[in-house]
Image (tube, rainbow, N blue to C red):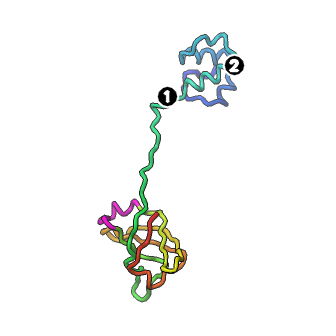
Amino acid sequence: MRQTSNPSLDEAELKKMKVSELRRLAEELGIESPSKKLKAQLITDILQKQKPPEELVKKRVEPKIEKIVGTILNFKTGMHRQEHHHILIGLPNVDNAESASRYIGRRAVWTSKTGKRIVGRIISVHGRNGTLLGRFRRGLPGQALGSNVEIL
């Protein structure tokens, strides 16, 4: 005989059980008059009884991060070259790496004066002072230095 005291049975396991086992499980869960119900009714009642009430289930609420405008500080540079696709971005009121790490993975959009948009992503934090490193699909021109970039 199967164990009926397991409260986390799914529908497939319940369908494999005999009607007598389902009635015994329904009695343990406190379902009214299980002897008069058919097998399908017993299964639906047991599944509903096993689910926790909706007020007890915590719904996951993700914090919204609004659109913020940052400043393009410089290209990522090495000893002998600079990367035109990688840009250092400074954000207002972000002064440490912890608060800057909230923006990793978000989209960055730079718009030229003619209206052309170049899209990239924030890939990491640069240093401990809250500077972000963004990688753009196309390299940004030198005129982009000092201009604004939107973090979406």
Is label 2 or label 1 in front? 1
Q: Is mark 1 on a helix, strand or loop?
A: loop
At which x and y percent is residue 135? 48, 73
Res. 121 mark:
none
Q: Give the CA separation, mark 2 to mark 1.
A: 24 Å
The magenta segment = 92-102
Between 88 and 26, the residue placed more toward the observer is 88
How packed mark 1 is, by other alpha carbons closer than 10 Å (few <14, some 14-19, many 20 or more), is: few
Residue 45, quarter of the rendered image: top right
Q: Position of residue 99 (x, y in %)?
A: 34, 60
**Mark 2 element type:** helix
Residue annotated with mark 1: 53
The residue labelled by disc 2 is 39
Residue 31 rendering spot, x and y as whole percentages:
57, 16
The answer to whether 61 is drawn above or below residue 19 in the figure is below
Q: Residue at x 42, y 67 (%)?
A: 124
The residue that appears at 41% across and 83% down in the rendered structure is: 78
State the image quarter where residue 71 is shown.
Answer: bottom left
Quadrant that contains the N terminus: top right
